[in-house]
Image (spheres, rainbow, N blue to C red):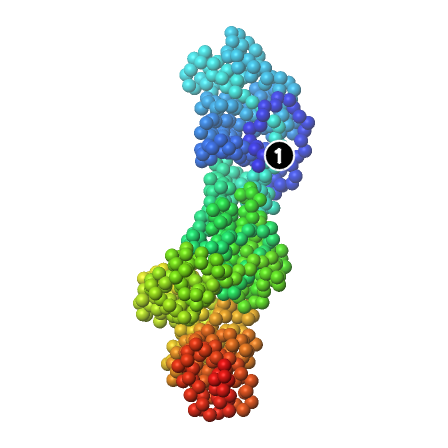
C-alpha cells in the first residue's frame, strides 16, 4: 500500500477538504468532539500502518512497532519502533489551526510527552493545516529553537507564552532554568507539521491496507468500522498499546511475518513436498519429462490404467517444487472433495485465514495476498467422473489464479485428439523408455527375456516386476498374472498371512461402498494393525493420505477384488452366475465413470485367471466365459482371440468345456474358441496332442470340427 503515517512537514494552510462520505459510526456521532475523536483514531491507524510498512521494509521486527493511544504523559498518540519514537497531536478543525491553538494547546500537550520521554519528532496532524500566521509562527519558533537557547530569546512574547505554559510541567522535575530552556529548545527543534490529512484520506490509507490484507476486499469498510470500534474501547484507558499484528488478529488474519508472501509460498511448497513424500514416488526412477503448465484453465492427462497418469502428475509436482512455483497435489474422487481440500490447503494452511474463502476466489485471493501473478497449479489425482471436468470446463476453470491438470477417468472414451480439453496422452513405455526404467530400478534390461520385456511396457507392471526381480534372481514369469500373484505373495510374506485376508476384506468393503478408500476407523474395524499397515505400505500395496487408506494403484485394487471373489467361488459362496453379475455391474459403472471404482478394466481377466486354476471346475468357468461372449466391451472376437490367450495353458480345460457346451446353432462361437486354443497350444506339441484326443473322444459335431481345424493348423 502507499505508506501513510507521518507526512512531510507543511506549514502552509491548504484549501478546505470536503468532508468524508457517510460513515456508519459517524452517523451516530452528532457532536464535533466525537467526530474529532474518530479522526484521531483513524489517523492513529494510518500513522501506525505507515510506521509499520516504512520500518518493515528495513527489516525491523514488526513486533517492535507499537502505537500508544492517549498516552498518560501527553500527546494523542506515540509510535514506538526499535529505532525511534514519534509523538502526535491530532487537530480536527473545519478551518485552519490558528496561532492561539499552537501556543495554548498543541505545544504544551506535546511538551508533556517530551518531558516524560524525549521523542525523535513531535508531529501536529491536522485536517486543514495552519493559518498563515500560525505557519509563520511555527517556522520562526522552530528556527529559533534549532539554534539553541540564545540570550534574551524568551523576550519574544510568543516564545515566552509557550515557555510559561510548559514550565509548570518541567518544574515538577526540579530542573534549573538553564536546563529548562535547553530542554524547551530541544523539543521545539523537533516539531513538525504534517501535510493535512482529512478523515477521508486517513480512511483511504487504512482501507488500502485492508483491501490488500483481507479475503474479501469489498468488506474493507466494514473491517475499518470493526477496527475503529476496537480502538474506541481500548482508548477508554490511557496508554493503550496497539500493534499491527494485534489489529490483524482482530480481523482473523495471520501475523505480519506469517502473511509475508515468501512465507505463504513456503507453506504451500512445504505442503506440496509433504504430498509427494506420501506417494510411492522417486523422481530418480521416472524416465518421463514433467508437463508444462499451460495457460489453459484445465488440462487433462489421458491414458489407460497403469500407463503412468499419476506418475506424470508426480513428475510435474516435483519439477514445480524444484522451481519453487506454487502447486497443490491432491488425491480426490470428486470435485466436491477436491475443492474442500483446496480450501483447506490454500486458504487455511497456506494463507492462514480465519474467514472462509469462496471456492472460485481461492486463486485470485492467493495472488492478491501474495502480490504475485503466479497461478497455482492444481494437480488432481484420482478424478473418477468426467462430468466433473465437463462442469469445470464450462465454468472456465476452477477460478482465476488456478490452473487445473487432472487425470481423465479410465474407461471414458477420450484420447489426445478427441478429448474435450487440452490434453497430454500417456501410453505404454517405448522400448527405450522400458530399458531406461529397468536400468534405473537396478534391473539389467539386457538379461530380461524378450517374452517378459514384452509385457513390461505397461509402466505399473514394470515397477512391480522390478521389485520382485531384485528379490528373486532368475525369476521368469510368463504373464502379468504371475507377476501380480508373486506381488501378492510378497505382501503375505512381509506382513503375515492374515494381512492378505484383510486386504480381501478391504476390497469387499470398497466394492460395497463404491469408494476407492477406507478411513482409519474402517481399517481398524477390518483388523489391520499398525505393523501390518506399515509393511503393506512399504511393500507397495497400500497408500495412505491423511486419514484415508487405499490400494496403491487401481491395478492392485482390481487384483485384490479378484482374490476376494475367487475365495467366494472356491468356497462355493458365489456361483459363476454370481460372478458374472458382479463383474458386469462393475463394468457398467466403470463405463459411466460415475463412481469411485472406475479403474477396474482388468477385473474380467483377473477373475478368469483366479478361477481357471482348478481344472475340476472347468465347466463352471465355461459358464462364466459364456456370460461375456455378447458383451459390447469384449464380444467373442476380443474375448477369445485377444484376452483369453493371455491366460496361457491353464485356460485350455475351460475352453474345452465351453466347446462341449455349444449348441447346434453355436458354430460361429466355435470358430473363435478354436482361434484361442490354437494360440495357447501352438508351441506345446504334447499338450496339443492330449487336447486333440479329448476333443475326438467327446465326438460332438463342434468338438470334431475344432479338432480337425487344430490338426490342420
Q: Position of residue 547 (x, y in %)?
A: 41, 60
Q: Residue furthest top?
A: 151
Q: How many numbered marks appear? A: 1
Q: Is residue 595 depicted above or below 41 in this figure?
A: below
Q: Judge from the rendering whether residue 493 lies leftward or rightward of residue 33; answer left or right.
A: left
Instruction: Answer whether residue 225 is visible to the viewer in this image.
Output: no
Q: Position of residue 43 (x, y in %)?
A: 56, 33
Q: Is residue 316 depicted above or below 567 in this figure?
A: above
335 or 471: nearer the eye?
Answer: 471
Q: Is residue 151 depicted above or below 500 in this figure?
A: above
Q: Secondary structure at mark 1?
A: helix
The residue shown at (49%, 87%) is 708
Q: Circle 1 is placed at which residue position?
A: 201
Give neighbour class at mark 1: few <14, some 14-19, many 20+ (Cα, 10 Å): some
Q: Residue furthest front?
A: 712
The residue shown at (54%, 74%) is 588
Q: Position of residue 73 (x, y in %)?
A: 46, 27
The residue shown at (53%, 76%) is 638
Q: Position of residue 99 (x, y in %)?
A: 61, 20
The residue shown at (45%, 55%) is 286
Tell me the quadrant of the picture where the N terminus can be found.
top right
241 or 49: nearer the eye?
Answer: 49
Instruction: Answer whether residue 489 is visible to the viewer in this image.
Output: yes
Amino acid at each position: 500500500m502507499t505508506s501513510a503515517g507521518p507526512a512531510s512537514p507543511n506549514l502552509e494552510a491548504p484549501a478546505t477538504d470536503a468532508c468524508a462520505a457517510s460513515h456508519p459510526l459517524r452517523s451516530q456521532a452528532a457532536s464535533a468532539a466525537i467526530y474529532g475523536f474518530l479522526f484521531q483514531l483513524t489517523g492513529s491507524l494510518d500513522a501506525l500502518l505507515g510506521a509499520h510498512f516504512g520500518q518493515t521494509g528495513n527489516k525491523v521486527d514488526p513486533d517492535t512497532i507499537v502505537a500508544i493511544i492517549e498516552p498518560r504523559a501527553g500527546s494523542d498518540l506515540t509510535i514506538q519502533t526499535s529505532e525511534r519514537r514519534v509523538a502526535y497531536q491530532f487537530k480536527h478543525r473545519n478551518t485552519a489551526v490558528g496561532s492561539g491553538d499552537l501556543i495554548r494547546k498543541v505545544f504544551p500537550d506535546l511538551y508533556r510527552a517530551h518531558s516524560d520521554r524525549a521523542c525523535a519528532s513531535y508531529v501536529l496532524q491536522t485536517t486543514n493545516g495552519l493559518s498563515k500566521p500560525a505557519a509563520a509562527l511555527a517556522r520562526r519558533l522552530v528556527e529559533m529553537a534549532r539554534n539553541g537557547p540564545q540570550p534574551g530569546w524568551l523576550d519574544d512574547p510568543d516564545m515566552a507564552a509557550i515557555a510559561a505554559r510548559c514550565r509548570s510541567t518541567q518544574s515538577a522535575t526540579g530542573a534549573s532554568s538553564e536546563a529548562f530552556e535547553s530542554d524547551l529548545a530541544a523539543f521545539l527543534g523537533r516539531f513538525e507539521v504534517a501535510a493535512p490529512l482529512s478523515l477521508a484520506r486517513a480512511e483511504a490509507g487504512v482501507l488500502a491496507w485492508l483491501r490488500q490484507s483481507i479475503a474479501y476486499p469489498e468488506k474493507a469498510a466494514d473491517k475499518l468500522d470493526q477496527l475503529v470500534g476496537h480502538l474506541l474501547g481500548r482508548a477508554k484507558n490511557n496508554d493503550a498499546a496497539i500493534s499491527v499484528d494485534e489489529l490483524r488478529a482482530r480481523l482473523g488474519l495471520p501475523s505480519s511475518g506469517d502473511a509475508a508472501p515468501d512465507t505463504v509460498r513456503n507453506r504451500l511448497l512445504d505442503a506440496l513436498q509433504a504430498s509427494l513424500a506420501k506417494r510411492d514416488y522417486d523422481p530418480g526412477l521416472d524416465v518421463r519429462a514433467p508437463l508444462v503448465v499451460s495457460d489453459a484453465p484445465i488440462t487433462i492427462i489421458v491414458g489407460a490404467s497403469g500407463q503412468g497418469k499419476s506418475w506424470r502428475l508426480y513428475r510435474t509436482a516435483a519439477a514445480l517444487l524444484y522451481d519453487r512455483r506454487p502447486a497443490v497435489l491432491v488425491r480426490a474422487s470428486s470435485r466436491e472433495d477436491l475443492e474442500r481440500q483446496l480450501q483447506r490447503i490454500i486458504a487455511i494452511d497456506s494463507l492462514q485465514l480465519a474467514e472462509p474463502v469462496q471456492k472460485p476466489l481461492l486463486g485470485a485471493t492467493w495472488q492478491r495476498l501474495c502480490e504475485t501473478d503466479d497461478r497455482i497449479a492444481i494437480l488432481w489425482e484420482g478424478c473418477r467422473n468426467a462430468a466433473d471436468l465437463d462442469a469445470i470446463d464450462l465454468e472456465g476453470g476452477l477460478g482465476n489464479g488456478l490452473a487445473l491438470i487432472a487425470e481423465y477417468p479410465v474407461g471414458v472414451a477420450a484420447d489426445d485428439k478427441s478429448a474435450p480439453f487440452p490434453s497430454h496422452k500417456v501410453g505404454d513405455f517405448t522400448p527405450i523408455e522400458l530399458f531406461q526404467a529397468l536400468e534405473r530400478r537396478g534391473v539389467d534390461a539386457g538379461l530380461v527375456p524378450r517374452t517378459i520385456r514384452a509385457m513390461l511396457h505397461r509402466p505399473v507392471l514394470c515397477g512391480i516386476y522390478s521389485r520382485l526381480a531384485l528379490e528373486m534372481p532368475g525369476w521368469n514369469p510368463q504373464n502379468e498374472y504371475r507377476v501380480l500373484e508373486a506381488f501378492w505373495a510378497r505382501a503375505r510374506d512381509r506382513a503375515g498371512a492374515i494381512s492378505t485376508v484383510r486386504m480381501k476384506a478391504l476390497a469387499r468393503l470398497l466394492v460395497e461402498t463404491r469408494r476407492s478408500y477406507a478411513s482409519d476407523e474402517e481399517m481398524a474395524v477390518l483388523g489391520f494393525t499398525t505393523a501390518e499397515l506399515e509393511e503393506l505400505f512399504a511393500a507397495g500395496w497400500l497408500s495412505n493420505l491423511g486419514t484415508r487408506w487405499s490400494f496403491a494403484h487401481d491395478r492392485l485394487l482390481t487384483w485384490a477384488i479378484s482374490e476376494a471373489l475367487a475365495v467366494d467361488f472356491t468356497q462355493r459362496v458365489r456361483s459363476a452366475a454370481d460372478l458374472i453379475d458382479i463383474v458386469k455391474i462393475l463394468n457398467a459403472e466403470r463405463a459411466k465413470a460415475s463412481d469411485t471404482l472406475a479403474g477396474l478394466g482388468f477385473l474380467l481377466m483377473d477373475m478368469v485367471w483366479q478361477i481357471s486354476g482348478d481344472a475340476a471346475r472347468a465347466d463352471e468357468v465355461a459358464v462364466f466365459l459364456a456370460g461375456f461372449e455378447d458383451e459390447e466391451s469384449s464380444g467373442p472376437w476380443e474375448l477369445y482371440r485377444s484376452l483369453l490367450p493371455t491366460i496361457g495353458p491353464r485356460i485350455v480345460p475351460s475352453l474345452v468345456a465351453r466347446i462341449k457346451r455349444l449348441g447346434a446353432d453355436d458354430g460361429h462361437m466355435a470358430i473363435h474358441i478354436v482361434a484361442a486354443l490354437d494360440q495357447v497350444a501352438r508351441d506345446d506339441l504334447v499338450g496339443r496332442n492330449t487336447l486333440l484326443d479329448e476333443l475326438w473322444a467327446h465326438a460332438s459335431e463342434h468338438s470334431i470340427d475344432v479338432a480337425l481345424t487344430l490338426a490342420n493348423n
